[in-house]
Structures are given as C-alpha cells and as structure tokens.
Image (tube, rainbow, N blue to C red):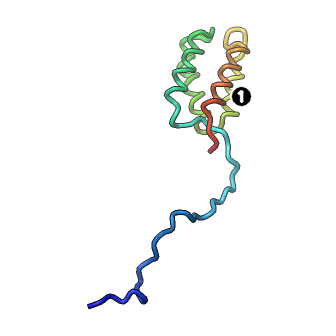
Amino acid sequence: MSINTKNSTRKPPRKFGASKPKNRDSKRQSMLSNRRIGPFKYDIKEILEKSSLDPSIQSSFLASLIAKASRTSIKDAKIYVKEFVSEEGLTDEEYSRISRLLDRYSKYR
C-alpha cells in the first residue's frame, strides 16, 4: 500500500522566512519596556528618596507613573511628572533626571 502524495489534502509546510506584512493602522509609540520595569523601579526610587516629594505621595506617584509609561506612552508620563514640579514637589533637575530615565527604559510598541 502506497500513499498517493499528489492528491493529498495535507497543507504544505510553513515557510518561516516569509511572513505576512503587518497592518499598522495605529502609529507606534514609545512606552516603558515591560522587561525592564524592575530596574526602572530601582533607579526611580533612588531619585524619589533624595527628592522633597512627600513620602506618603511617593508610592502612588510611582505606581501612576509606571502605569502611564507602560500603558499609554512615555510622552503622557512626562506630562504627569511635570504636574508635580513645584516648590514643595519635584525640582526641575529631578524632572529632567526622571525624563532621561523614562527615555532610557522605553521601547517602541
């Protein structure tokens, strides 16, 4: 008994080199890399410990910042940080350090 391979209904093997082009209706945005959230938290906590931001606000500020940076965009996260720049909150130097940190841990998605 031999199997007729010419009239077989088996699908041809998948070619790994050729893929379908992705339909990009939406524009890619810079967001916080999910793989690097741990090191990002460590670095931002160092900045917040030295800042004059109220310690009771720091944890909610950090959680909101990570959520905005990883779910919406780095741009929105920077706007959120800019709202805390004042005499009693963050300084301009701390804002620039946080902005550089956000840019360093970002990824286009």
Q: Quadrant of residue 18?
A: bottom right
Looking at the figure, which quarter contains the C terminus?
top right
| Quarter of the image with the N terminus in it | bottom left
Residue 96: horizontal and vertical position, in percent? 71, 20
For residue 26, side relative to residue 16 (left or right): right
Q: Residue at x 55, y 63 (%)?
A: 17
**Residue 82 versus residue 19 in the image, above or below:** above
Residue 72, located in which quarter of the rendered image? top right
Residue 34 image offset from top left, x and y in percent: 53, 37
As drawn, 6 above or below 98: below
Q: Position of residue 93 (x, y in %)?
A: 71, 14
Image-based side of 3 in relation to 9, left or right: left
The residue to which callout 1 is attached is: 79
Image quadrant assignment for residue 70: top right
Name the residue at 57% across, 20% down: 44
What's under tag 1, amino acid-wise? Ile
| Residue at the image point whose x is 36% and y is 89% from the top | 4
Residue at 58%, 22% (x, y): give it.
61
Q: Secondary structure at mark 1?
A: helix
- Determine whether, in the image, residue 7 is placed left or right of residue 32: left
Spot occupied by residue 99 in the image (x, y as percentages of width and height): 68, 25
Horizontal placement of 56 versus 21: left or right?
left
